[in-house]
Image: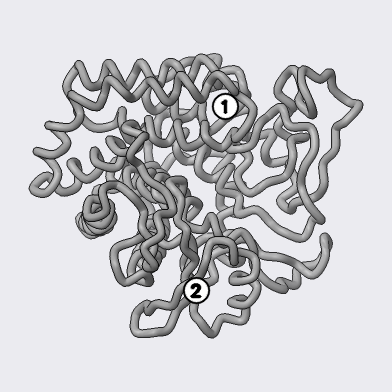
């Protein structure tokens, strides 16, 4: 872990990115991305990407938690508490310890745009702190995993009793609702939006945090489940790595799941099975020039000079990327090894613009939008502070 109080050059860039995120990306406590009047305008007309607000709020919680672990600053602790409260709102609004994709005051000037953009997921009414709110449903496993990743990071990096109590409360509430519905995510109308039934790796990751944060409720359940289910952890990874390009976001989910599985104590048998799955994953992604995935490996396997130097370089490259979703088209510039796919990873500075760079294929040659939506910058803040926490040079 990096020592607190030591000045690092990357902190200035991280501070600027965080200041922008706080000013523009969390109008109601959860991460969303602003839509500007034009590519060169600073006038915010609306917000977008509400449907993934839960996962990125979880990633924000992780980034702020690791920042606190490094700096021990009151500002970072405030950021941790703010992100935890955002997650609390995403649960309170449903009235049933169910996680919403996104939530906002019913009278928000952006409400109509969000409902229109996310109409395929359905929307519901609720209340937060005595005020009428609207929330977006059809919650996916991605959203739960992002939140539990953030809660796990907070548990690992923040020793504040209030934060630990908040983590325990939120994890217990979410796990209780999942348990009540047989690990299915059930909407108020009875519709099942997704289920963790077939993904024992993801179930164990959620349950392991429950066991760590609330032993009285989940210790026995985890200790009974893990030895039997751990053998099934490598199987979905073995399937997913057979196609390393389609639905690349699956690898972001896999890496954050293994962060949860491989931090905290376990029996040697259980850990061995978890590591079999993680090793399978890394044999596919270790040459993708993915700073976030590399930093997770640093957290789980320890320092490795060549990989860690590469991570630092990739983050420095990130600083040269556009923050808005400008269109990118590299057709004719690279050798292709498939339809619209390069043979080698494209340099970070030239990759397609997106919400979180590390969940997009580094081989994708075109993408982006009109240049009016700004990313939150979590794809710098999270690997930077997580890397610092686990010993990456800053």
| Image location of residue 301, percent across then percent down | 38, 19
Q: Residue at x 29, y 67 (%)?
A: 96
In the image, taking residue 250 as reference, residue 71 lies left or right, namely: left
Q: Residue at x 50, y 73 (%)?
A: 104
Q: Nearer the viewer, residue 73 or 87?
A: 87
| Tag 1 residue | 311
Q: Residue at x 58, y 39 (%)?
A: 9
| Image location of residue 239, percent across then percent down | 48, 22
| Image location of residue 154, percent across then percent down | 33, 47
Q: Looking at the rendering, in which quadrant would you find the N terminus?
A: top left
* Figure label count: 2
Q: Earlier in the sequence, mark 2 or mark 1?
A: 2
For label 1, the SS is helix
**The residue positioned farthest toward the right in the image shown:** 332
Residue neighbourhood size for the residue with mark 1, other residues' Cα within 10 Å, grouped as few (<14), some (14–19), many (≥20): many
The disc placed on residue 104 is: 2
Q: Nearer the viewer, residue 320 or 359?
A: 359
- The answer to whether the residue labelled 2 contacts the one labelled 1, judged by CB atoms less than 8 Å apart, is no
Of marks 2 and 1, the one in the foreground? 2
Is residue 98 visible in the rendered structure shown here? yes
Q: CA distance from mark 2 to mark 1?
A: 36 Å
The disc placed on residue 206 is: none
Q: Residue at x 66, y 64 (%)?
A: 34
For label 2, the SS is strand
């Amino acid at each position: 872990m990096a020592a607190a109080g030591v000045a690092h050059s990357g902190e200035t860039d991280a501070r600027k990115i965080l200041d922008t995120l706080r000013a523009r990306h969390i109008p109601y406590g959860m991460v969303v991305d602003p839509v500007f009047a034009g590519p060169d305008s600073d006038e915010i007309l609306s917000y977008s990407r509400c449907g993934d607000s839960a996962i990125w709020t979880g990633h924000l919680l992780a980034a702020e938690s690791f920042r606190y672990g490094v700096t021990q600053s009151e500002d970072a602790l405030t950021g941790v508490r703010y992100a935890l409260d955002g997650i609390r709102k995403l649960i309170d609004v449903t009235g049933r310890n169910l996680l919403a994709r996104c939530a906002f005051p019913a009278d928000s000037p952006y409400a109509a745009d969000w409902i229109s953009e996310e109409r395929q997921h359905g929307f519901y009414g609720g209340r937060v702190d005595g005020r009428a709110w609207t929330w977006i449903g059809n919650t996916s496993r991605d959203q739960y995993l992002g939140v539990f990743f953030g809660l796990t990071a907070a548990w690992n990096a923040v020793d504040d009793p209030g934060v630990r109590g908040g983590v325990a409360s939120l994890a217990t509430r979410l796990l209780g609702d999942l348990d009540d519905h047989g690990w299915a995510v059930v909407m108020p109308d009875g519709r099942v939006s997704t289920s963790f039934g077939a993904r024992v790796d993801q179930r164990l990751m959620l349950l392991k945090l429950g066991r760590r944060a609330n032993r009285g409720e989940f210790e026995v359940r985890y200790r009974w489940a893990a030895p039997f289910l751990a053998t099934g952890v490598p199987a979905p990874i073995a399937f997913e790595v057979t196609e390393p390009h389609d639905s690349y976001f699956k690898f972001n989910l896999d890496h954050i799941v293994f962060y949860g599985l491989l931090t905290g104590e376990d029996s040697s048998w259980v850990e061995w099975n978890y590591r079999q799955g993680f090793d399978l994953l890394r044999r596919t992604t270790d040459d993708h020039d993915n700073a976030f995935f590399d930093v997770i490996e640093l957290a789980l396997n320890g320092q490795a000079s060549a990989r860690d130097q590469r991570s630092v370089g990739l983050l420095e490259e990130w600083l040269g990327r556009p923050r808005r979703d400008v269109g990118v088209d590299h057709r004719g510039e690279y050798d292709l090894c498939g339809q619209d796919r390069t043979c080698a990873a494209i340099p970070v500075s030239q990759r397609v613009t997106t919400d979180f760079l590390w969940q997009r294929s580094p081989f994708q040659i075109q993408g982006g939008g009109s240049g009016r939506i700004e990313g939150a910058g979590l794809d710098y803040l999270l690997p930077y502070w997580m890397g610092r926490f686990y010993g990456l040079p800053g």
